[in-house]
Image (cartoon, helix red, strand yellow):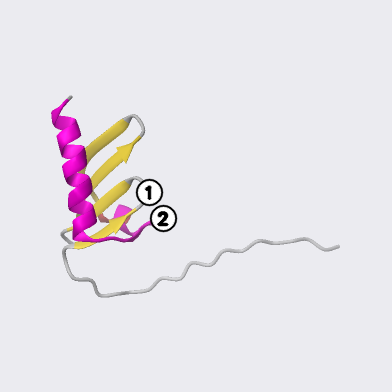
Amino acid sequence: MKITIEKTETIKTEVEIKLPYYRKTNCHYLKVYSETKCLQVCQLEGYMGIEQARIGLAFGKDTVDSTEEEFLAKWDEVYYLLLRL
């Protein structure tokens, strides 16, 4: 009898980052500013917000590196949309 077993391995790597550090997903822009916290700018269809979040969100499997310029551009966009509510 043959069966197929799918196996996923997790590899943990320790890296040195300099704060502030910027990450993003398809709808979140994140600014890591401490060892435990980050700022999150979120814009989804039907939802937008700016809030403090836990640092784990910034280093999830769907995040990629970003820049201060990208973060600030999204911050401005969402901030001014929220002001108009």
Question: What predominant SS class does the magenta segment belong to?
Answer: helix
Whether residue 61 can be seen here = yes
- In the figure, 50 relative to 39: above or below? above
Q: Relative to the observer, which residue lies in front, 65 or 76?
A: 76
Residue 3 % position (x, y) = 78, 61
Query: Residue at (34%, 29%) from the top-left corner?
Result: 46
**Mark nearer the viewer, 2 or 1:** 1
The residue beneath circle 2 is 62
Residue 4: image location, x then y, percent: 74, 61
Task: Check residue 62 for magenta coloring.
Answer: yes
Q: Amino acid at mark 1?
A: Asn
Q: Position of residue 85 (x, y in %)?
A: 18, 24
41 relative to 26 in the view: left or right? left
Q: Which residue is mark 1?
A: 26
At x 24%, y 55%, the residue is 70
Q: Secondary structure at mark 2?
A: loop
Q: Residue furthest top?
A: 85
Mark 2 surroundings within 10 Å by alpha-carbon count, few (fewer than 14), some (14 through 19), many (20 or more): few
Q: Residue 16: which numbered mark, if any? A: none
Would you say the residues marked 2 and 1 are in contact, meaning their CB atoms lie under 8 Å apart? yes
Image point (37%, 73%), residue name? 13
Tell me which label, 2 or 1, sits earlier in the chain. 1
Q: Is residue 53 above or below residue 5?
A: above
In the image, the segment drawn in magenta is 57-84
Is residue 36 on the magenta stretch?
no
Kindly indicate the quadrant of the structure image that contains residue 21.
Answer: bottom left
